[in-house]
Structure formats: C-alpha cells, structure tokens
Amino acid sequence: MLGLNKKDTSLMIVVAILALFAPFILNPFPEGSAMAQFNAGYPDLMQRFVIFGIFAIGFNILFGLTGYLSFGHAAFLGIGSYSVVWMYKLLDYNVIWGLPLAIITSGLFALLIGYVSLRRSGIYFSILTLAFAQMSFNLAYSVLTPITNGETGLQVYTDDAQVLLGANEATSPHLFGIVMNSSAKLDLGPWSFTFNNGYYFCAIILLLVFYLAIRIFRSPFGMMLRAIKSNQTRLNYTGLNPRPYALAAFVISGMYAGLAGGLMAAMDPLAGAERMQWTASGEVVLMTILGGTGTLIGPVLGAGFIKYFENIFSKINDNILHQWFAFLPDGLEDFVVFIIHPFIGKGWHLTLGILFMLVVIFLPGGLVEGGQRIKRALSRKKDADAAKTEPAE
C-alpha cells in the first residue's frame, strides 16, 4: 500500500515501534536507583533524538547517496529556527504556520548555496559549504541583528504583533491547541514514564520524512545519485548531466535540515546564531558516519548515540562515581574514580572520540554494520545447532 518492499516495510515498522514506545524503552531503570542516571526518557532529550535524527536523515541523502560532504548544513538548521520564531512574532504560536516556511526558506537558501558550491567537488565543495555556513553564522551573530537579534537570540516578546493570537490561545508553541510542552505521566511501581505532546509531534514527522527517504533511496532519482557517487566521469560519458541531480539532493537535504531547525524552535521558541556554527555541521557528519553512511536507519541511530552521550555521560560527576564504587575499599575507590574521571562529565568528548575511532576502525559501516554482523552470527549459530540435531533425529 505504501509502495515499499517487504524489507523496507519491516524497517518502517521497527522505526515506528521505537518512536512510539520510546518513553518505555529509554527508561529501563527504576526512579531513584543508582542506574537511573542512564535513563533517557525525559521529553527534552527524546525530542533531541528525533529532531537530530531528521537532520541526519536529510544529510545522508546528500552525503550517503552522492558522496558530497557538506560542512555547512547547520546554516539551514538556523534558518529553519529563525523562520519559525518569526512566525510566532508575526502571527501566533501555532507551529503549523512556521514549519512550512522553515522548509521553503531553507530550500531556497540551499538552492543558492548548492548552485555555487556544486561547481566544485571533493574537498573544494566541502570548503565552500563551510565558508557559506560561517558567513551565515557571522551575518546572524553581528550583521543582521534587526532580523536575528544578534548574540541574544531571536525570541517572542509581549509587544510583538502576533495578529492571529486569540484571547484564550496558549502562549507557548502549540498545534491547534495541543501545547507542545504539555506532558502526561504514568507511574508503574518504581518506574515513571513521561508522554510529551511535543515529542510525539516530532516523532510523527520523523516517520513521515523517514518514509520519504525510503522512497528517495529506492527511486530512479536515488539510483542517479548513487551513480554520481560511484563514478561521475563515467556518468558524463553516458550523456547525462549529474549537476541537476546533485543540486536537487542538496536542496532536499537542506529542507530536511530546515525542518529540523523549525522543530527545535517549535519545542523551544528561541533561535540563536550558535545553531549555525560549523561545529553543528560537523556533528551531523559524525552522526551519519557513526550510524552508517548510505543506510536508512543508520543516521537515526548515530544521532541518538551522540545525543545520548552528550546529555547522559556529561552529567556523571565524581560524586556519582563515588556512590557507584562505595563498596570498594577507600583507597581503591579513589583510584577507580581517578581513572574514570577524565572520561565523564566535561570529558565526555574523549569517550565519544574513542568510541568513534573504534567504530571507524572495526565497523566501517557504522552501527548498522555491527547489527548486521550480530544478526549473521546468530543466524550461523542457529544453522549450526540445526545441523547438529539432524543426525540425532
């Protein structure tokens, strides 16, 4: 019915289950237990998983299919955020007005930047996109302050026009009255699960854009993008001009990034120039590579992996470590904490860097390749067990 084959349908169902049941899956440990530190089922973090998953899916359409490595996609993330906040200031807090504008605006900027950048390939393309992103950051930070509010960031004030704002309307982002920051809690014994409106709004959009990515990957257009990555010179010899296809991929990828930026503003009505920095562009590159370049679910896994480390491991401090290892003798406890200390808290980047190195060295295909290896190993074990039982029978 959806135009998907059996494998893609199974993948879509898996993503839907993970998205819908995330409040349960991400809260495996009881509240108040020592391991509750590793729970990630609170709304802000779950929203980040989904939003950056959308960002990475779009980036993968460009990088994974065409091989063009962009270091400037954070510019579209920022443009999407500014577009949504401006709709809040001019109309009202309904997110339905801002998100389409975020997609359109980021797509137009991507068309302009891509048209110039795609005149070059390889490292020159990457440098051009990085230059455009940094120009966008500096314009937003210090030049276009009447539009972006500079370093303070763009936000909604009581004296803004908001011409559609009704007397009884919510004064925070909502979808026709469904307030994004509203949540419902479910307590089951020592466990506490939070169901947030904003998260499920983002999760539904994730499923839609993931389905669109599947259709792009399996389409003739997706095949052309793979041909560009495989051998662009040979493609030229066939009489086909690859640039329009690469430009279309760049624009689609930029629109995904704009949508992600718009959703960030839909969850928190604030837009700042820091979202356009080159570090944000580098982060989405890491997400895609870590999850699995050119795969469908890989970027989503990579986004979740990095955001988990950023928000969970960065909060672990020496006091928590002393609680965990309190059963050890005092001298040994202090020694263990001293050894682990550089890898947690502010040093979480070190842990992430080591894990990233291990994945690149031993799993070049990312986390998806790791899952495939485990699946093959289990399949071989099952076949071996079946072969042993046959003679006995």
Image (spheres, rainbow, N blue to C red):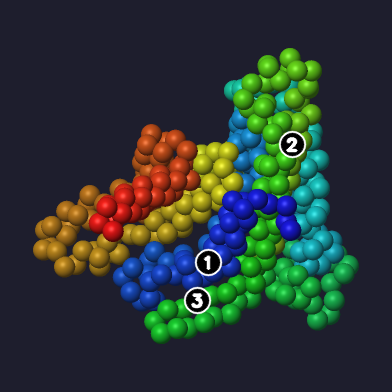
* Residue placed furthest toward the top: 237
How far across and down, in percent of the image, does residue 234 sit?
68, 17
Which three-letter amino acid code belongs to the residue tagged 1?
A: Ala
Q: Earlier in the sequence, mark 1 or mark 2?
A: 1
Q: Is residue 125 above or below residue 155?
A: above
Residue pictured at 47% horizontal, 66% vertical: 26
Q: How many marks?
A: 3
Can you identify the residue that label 3 sits on? 193
Q: Is residue 344 left or right of residue 191?
A: left
Judged from the image, the secondary structure of the residue bearing numbered disc 3 is strand
Judged from the image, the secondary structure of the residue bearing numbered disc 2 is helix
Whether label 1 touches label 2, CB < 8 Å: no
Q: Quadrant of residue 181?
A: bottom right
Q: Earlier in the sequence, mark 1 or mark 3?
A: 1
Report how far apart the C-alphas of labels 1 and 3 lie in the structure. 10 Å
* Residue closest to the eye, 40 or 74: 40
Residue pictured at 49% horizontal, 71% vertical: 24
Whether label 1 touches label 3, CB < 8 Å: no
Report how far apart the C-alphas of labels 2 and 3 lie in the structure. 43 Å
Q: In which quadrant will I find the N terminus?
A: bottom right
Q: Say which of marks 2 and 3 sits in front.
A: 2
